[in-house]
Amino acid sequence: MTVSHLYKTAALAALLLLPFLSTSSIAASGDFTQRAEVQQFIDMMVSKHQFERASLTQLLAEAKLKEGIIKAISRPYESKPWYKYRPIFVTKKRIKRGLKFWQDNHATLVRAEEQYGVPPEIITAIIGVESFYGRHKGRYRVLDALTTLGFDYPRRSKFFRSELKHYLLMTREEQIDPLSVKGSYAGAMGTPQFIASSYREYAVDFSDDGKRDLWHNMDDVIGSVANYFRRHGWQHGAPIASQVNTSGEDFKKILNKRLKPKMTLAQIKTHGITFDNEQPNNVPNTIKATLIELQNRSGTEHWLGYQNFYVISRYNHSALYSMAVFQLATELRKQHNDAAEELN
């Protein structure tokens, strides 16, 4: 091979690699606005939602690619077995803090139950699991999180681009600086950790001060969580979950990764399912449920999840999450009632 041929071959190889190197350098620098798909996103926001092109381009140029966000979403807590997941959320410290939260916000929680039908312990447990009652609201800029996941996480890019759209609309509607908001690696915000589409759809001004503030206004936080649950089909006074026993192998046929109840309890019981003690009075044979299996260190445990369990999962589509909220709420209610009895 001649020297001139060698140079020509190297030059051709460099030209062939240029598009990939360019994309890589853009990703490394976080300069999202040079990407074709980001320009298409800007075009959509300008044409459909009347954003000003230059301002939006300048804003998205401020977004930073965060590799830590990709790593975090690739190893969520919900990938852990139940025996490792439960101790993260159902703890003495979280229960103690939850009882204090309940006490401090008693009147608002009562009002939320009256208006939306969601009991105080469920609202308190959600806030406890999501942000430790407002202590942990997230450390990533939401703009960085949603842009990173929208354009560098192909598995769920469609969802996160939609959330980026909602975030830009939300910050415009609520008159919030989009560069100022911090949240989770997935872009969840505030004390209840609402994603942008949920904020726009379910947040309420429960304090009646003309704003929906899910960062500092606990009335708005409580009312918004309660509204979220009611809008997703919460049934006041209905059961949430029951632990059950299994026998034989037939129960494995009805184990369902989807949490929406499909079978009646009467149907489920024909597959070797029985209650630990007597069937609870508020669990009729006509109620629909789904059978859930949780992994312990020494084996498995089985639960029936009803409609309200499914509603909890609308916050996070995981049986582990819903069970942690349910068990934290159960312990909060028990200790709240015990404390009330001691005072009487």
Image (cartoon, rainbow, N blue to C red):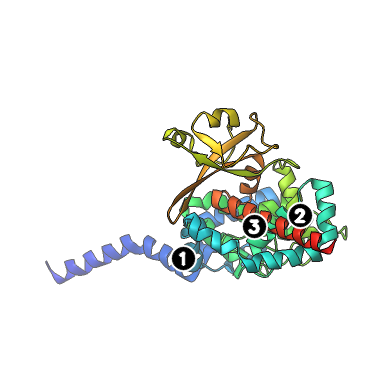
Give left or right: position of 9 versus 98: left
Asked whether residue 62 is in view, the answer is: yes
**Closer-to-camera residue (249/21):** 249
Of the pair 275 and 235, the residue shown nearer to us: 275
Say which of 204 and 97 sits in front.
97
Separation of residues labelled 3 and 2 (CA atoms): 12 Å
The three-letter code of the residue at mark 3 reads: Leu
Image quadrant for the C terminus?
bottom right
Indicate the position of residue 125 as horizontal and vertical percent values: 68, 57
> In what quadrant of the picture does the N terminus appear?
bottom left
For the view shown, which residue lies furthest in the left direction? 1
Mark 1 Cα within 10 Å, few/some/many (few <14, many 20+)?
many
| Residue 133 is at least partly visible in this image | no
Quadrant hosting residue 261? top right
What residue did someone put label 3 on?
Answer: 328
Q: Residue at x 55, y 59 (%)?
A: 86
Which tag is nearer the camera, tag 1 or tag 3? Answer: 3
Q: Which mark is residue 120?
A: 2
For mark 1, what is the residue? 27
- Lateral position of residue 54 relative to residue 38, left or right: right
Discs 1/2, front: 2
- Residue 188's place in the image compared with 29, above or below, is above
Badge 3 local density, few (<14 within 10 Å), some, or many (20+)?
many
The disc placed on residue 76 is: none
Residue drawn at 62 percent across, 64 percent down:
142
Q: What residue is shown at x 70% (from left), y 68% (from top)?
A: 97
Measure how far apart labels 1 and 3 are at the Cα level.
Answer: 41 Å
Q: Secondary structure at mark 1?
A: helix
Q: Position of residue 282 (x, y in %)?
A: 70, 37
Residue 111 on image: x %, y %: 85, 53
Q: Residue at x 63, y 39 (%)?
A: 306
- Kind of residue at disc 2: Pro
